[in-house]
Amino acid sequence: MAITMPKKFGFLMIFNLTLTEIVLSGNVLIWPTDGSHWLNIKIILEELTQRNHSVTVLASTATLFINSSLDSPINFEEIPVSFTKNDIDSLIEHMVMLWTNHRPTPLTLWTFYKELGKLLDTFFQINIQICDGVLNNPKLMSRLQEGSFDVLVADPVTICGDLVALKLGIPFMYTLRFSPASTVERHCGKIPAPASYVPAALSELTDRMTFGERVKNSISYPLQDYIFQSYWGEWNVYYSKVLGRPTTLCETMGKAEIWLLRTYWDFEFPRPYLPNFEFVGGLHCKPAKPLPKEIEEFVQSSGEHGIVVFSLGSMVRNLTEEKANLIASGLAQIPQKVLWRYQGKKPDTLAANTRIYDWIPQNDLLGHPKTKAFITHGGTNGIYESIYHGVPMVGVPMFADQHDNIAHMKAKGAAVEVNMHTMTSAELRDALKTVIYEPSYKENAMRLSRIHHDQPVKPLDRAVFWIEFVMRHKGAKHLRPAAHNLTWFQYHSLDVIGFLLACMATVIFLVTKCCLFSCRKFGRTGKKKKRE
Amino acid sequence: MAITMPKKFGFLMIFNLTLTEIVLSGNVLIWPTDGSHWLNIKIILEELTQRNHSVTVLASTATLFINSSLDSPINFEEIPVSFTKNDIDSLIEHMVMLWTNHRPTPLTLWTFYKELGKLLDTFFQINIQICDGVLNNPKLMSRLQEGSFDVLVADPVTICGDLVALKLGIPFMYTLRFSPASTVERHCGKIPAPASYVPAALSELTDRMTFGERVKNSISYPLQDYIFQSYWGEWNVYYSKVLGRPTTLCETMGKAEIWLLRTYWDFEFPRPYLPNFEFVGGLHCKPAKPLPKEIEEFVQSSGEHGIVVFSLGSMVRNLTEEKANLIASGLAQIPQKVLWRYQGKKPDTLAANTRIYDWIPQNDLLGHPKTKAFITHGGTNGIYESIYHGVPMVGVPMFADQHDNIAHMKAKGAAVEVNMHTMTSAELRDALKTVIYEPSYKENAMRLSRIHHDQPVKPLDRAVFWIEFVMRHKGAKHLRPAAHNLTWFQYHSLDVIGFLLACMATVIFLVTKCCLFSCRKFGRTGKKKKRE
């Protein structure tokens, strides 16, 4: 790690630190996950390079979004794999279609889980190939060894980053959005989650639950734990083999120095956490830049009615013709102008107020003063841009965490949900009118925006601070709870409870015995006396 | 609240905030606790006034340290009470003597707790007088109403600050060091504390416990809860009377917007907490200023051996003659020069290397490059100054949280403990030699210092940030967990567990019944068939 003086940390307390400790120019190794995850971590990498760090991304030869064509000094190390970009593309399309076309009835639920199981298994095979592509690749490993990295930052949705770090003998940390029912955060990160007010991720519940919802929530946790054990359990064998000693995926994940979670209290419900968890949601958000001329003219043509921004994210490109027509006819019924990011066939019902674009400058549009509402699939990145700019939302969730994300925004009064499967044109129109004309939605969106902006340090600066902290101190052990050293029954004090119950039982037994003995003795003495 | 632009929050994100929201000149009402607590909060008040806030301190006419003679623009509102400074002084002296002279044997334990109970009762009577002095004082209350305060910051060790805030209709927040076994933080603030690795405050345990220690810890929690219920329970009646509805002290405390805790992860063991808890330990620490000429000359005369700083804090002024002689003769046996803050009679055994002072510039001495060790009673303020400057400690704890504080520093390898009751001169000398000449103590003290200095924002700035946040947003409800809306059995999901057990029992009962019925039926049919 080269010695330079800090550039941006004007607020960093540097008394008593020797020069080697305030070093801020280091080598960072990145273990990313593709898709929207990459879009988020890319922002951190760009900031790291701006702060004079050398950044190297480890990615397979078959990535969709991760590429070296960026106009930035980020290095890329390719992991050779036998699958191709097309395989990944069709796999993701398969997953999106499975989720979006699934109507939650008991009859289809079985097929859904069976199909999902198959998909997860394919992902597992792909992930194993990525792991082997590094760990069983002496040339690549020796190049990485020579790279003298100071820290590895991993998105744990793609497994093995931690293993690579351990093999290289460097500290590692995570950047994570969530795991279902926070299984990973709870079991491997040790954060507590009382089922009475911490809704399980993906449950679509809030922190204020009825009795029935609390029952559902309490069942969600062990159910997800079971699924985690059965799906992720296969990794325990792999991890033990690589590390040459019996271990588990979870035990290894527990060695992470810091967990950067991609949410904050504008989005999350307040819940317990640990000092090595840092909530950096919305780190990618930026003030709006001026719009391209054509778009700006269209936006300005909306007059006092303003505009609606509409995107279903980077993963969904097409809809059925029927669905697209239904949506377009709904949009036709509002006085606002609509900018719709859509790559499918132009719907027949498309009205003059709606324009279709292959791509839109989403953040710049959401930050435009004329923007009245955002129709979103509910991805975390988009929701955070909406929070950042204080724009109320109409949520059309489709898969993964999107339903849960929209449930959060609904609970905070900043969104209305429309069901993708059952919606009519009128429902979409009414939802838009509600968030645009009922003032509470704008007020709540602005309240979340204020919360987001009013933090002691910006999320991106905090994320980078903790990466640099781990580099400066070769870890952050002082933030890691001792819970990691306990077995599950010790953690829950089951041995102590058992011991105390045994003590109580012994005392009760002895006291009862003594009483009985005394009663008998005094009884006999009494009888004797009577006889006498 | 007047409208001015922010002065110091260069790092504050101000996009999307309207002018009224970035207001930083407000009216702050302070509900302090006397003694070392005041010395800590005073630093926050000075910072608040420097940032153009108007600060008013509500304090009784009989305070020891809290006074208006400060050369600062802090306002004071006097609460009329019938007790005097001397009463408080002798009460504290009584408490210190009781604690310091108590040798923990089963025989004396009973007397100790009986005496302590009496003392707590006297404190209760004094506290009630303070409460009545405000709440039953229409003139004072109407002056406070006219003061248009934006927030009340209370040290909850002196009870009633929250009540005053509720009566004035303003948000309130706490600044707190600890409560025994974190009873207040757990029950009223709702932070979880797994007994398996979170040592109960005052237990002198660490986060790495043997089975026996975990048993002790698991008992400590309910024991302290019981003491809290019985001692603080009297307040429930008072609070219900003042608020005119049935309530409890704990329910009212739970309405605090933010809890500023006066520790950090350099001192604490990593443990779960909630987003409305902020750890601002060491906010009073500052870089060392040059020493007065006479002291600097004495320090320089120590040569390469350096100096030892020795203070038993602001509460202990005298020791028995025997103890003072024993200490002086221990200090005589080291090559370092010693600066001892002591107001008692000069001990006969005092050697040339030791000088006694009525008062010492403790922080400036601890920050002096010649300082090798700090002999301390283990008060949090002093420990934090030692951490700040990276000075290893010899702890001579006497009362309150001091034993526990020293246990923390011992666990982190930065201190050696000497027993005040049983120590010999040789033990004190050996303890000093250990922390001075065994390099690990200095290394660990420096490690803690680095952790303390390497935070994204300084503790004092964080404390002030959250006070200003509560002023800007009239609270911090987005950080308050929904756990506050649950009863204790709902919080622990006991109703859900009961319901699920009942469901299981019903299913088992029905299945068993069905099986029995089928067996009987098939049994009969079988018998019939056999007969046929």
Image (tube, coloured by chain):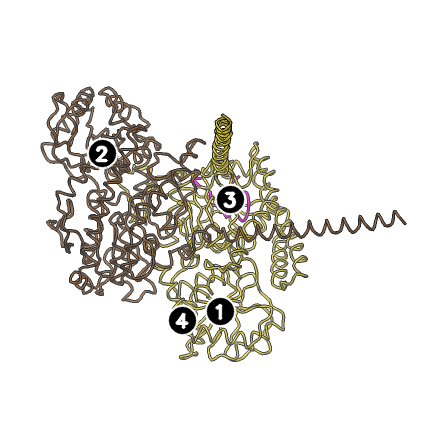
Chain colours: A brown, B yellow
Residue hosting label 3: B187
**Residue type at the position of mark 3:** His
Residue hosting label 4: B440
Q: CA distance from mark 1 to mark 3?
A: 33 Å
* Mark toward the viewer: 3 or 2: 2
Same subunit: marks 4 and 1: yes
Q: Please give the chain letter of the residue carrying mark 1.
A: B
* Label 2: few (<14), some (14–19) or many (≥20) C-alpha neighbours in 10 Å: some
Which residue is pictured at 42% across the width and 66% down the height?
B364
Residue hosting label 2: A98
Q: Is residue A56 left or right of residue B359?
A: left
Q: Magenta segment, which residues? A: B149-163
**Residue type at the position of mark 1:** Val
Q: Please give the chain letter of the residue carrying mark 3.
A: B
Same subunit: marks 1 and 2: no
Q: CA distance from mark 2 to mark 4?
A: 59 Å
* Mark toward the viewer: 1 or 2: 2
